[in-house]
Image: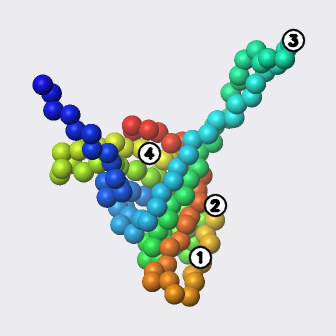
Amino acid sequence: MADFNSREYEWADLTLILGGRDITTIRAVKYTSKIERESVYAKGRLPRSIQSGNMMFEGEITLLRSGYEALVKSGKGTVLSLSLDGLFVYGNPAEGNALTTTRAVGIQFTEAAVEDKQGNKFQEITLPFICLNIKEQA
């Protein structure tokens, strides 16, 4: 009988390589692929088909302040000037996990908002981005 491992990937299994650098200050990540779709109508009330249009790729990376400052330094004073590729790698080979890699091509940040509040023990900064493509299993 074959051995079956039902272990799922968890937060500790995520490695983010951004512009060739392992980002150890990452707190959260989100990325989305979208496509425009529209029903096409003709005679009657029901759609005849669904047509597809442009694709869009976007996301967010949340970092600790020190990671944000390292990106600002790389961008010569702003993260808005950066254009980076990102690798989201899931799995831990030391534990025998198969690696799953997602590649975000041409990441450019769209906003650089810094916020802090009284009582915070650390500072998180969320950087929304758009990119040219998100390739699963890359």
Q: Is residue 29 left or right of residue 41?
A: left
Which residue matches tag 4?
103
**Residue under the image location 60 percent in, 65 percent down:** 80
Residue 138 image offset from top left, x and y in percent: 39, 38
| Between 45 and 61, the one nearer to me in the picture | 45
- Element at badge 4? strand
Vertical comparison of 1 with 91: above or below: above
Disc 3 residue type (three-letter): Lys
Q: Is residue 106 left or right of residue 66?
A: right
Instruction: Tell which tag, 3 or 2, sits nearer the viewer.
Output: 3
**Residue under the image location 63 percent in, 60 percent down:** 110
**Residue under the image location 43 percent in, 77 percent down:** 66
Which residue matches tag 1?
114
> What separation in Å lies between label 4 and label 1 (alpha carbons)?
26 Å
Disc 1 residue type (three-letter): Val
Q: Residue furthest bottom?
A: 118
Q: In this orientation, does residue 124 appear?
A: yes
> What separation in Å lies between label 3 and label 4 (alpha carbons)?
43 Å
Q: Earlier in the sequence, mark 3 or mark 4?
A: 3
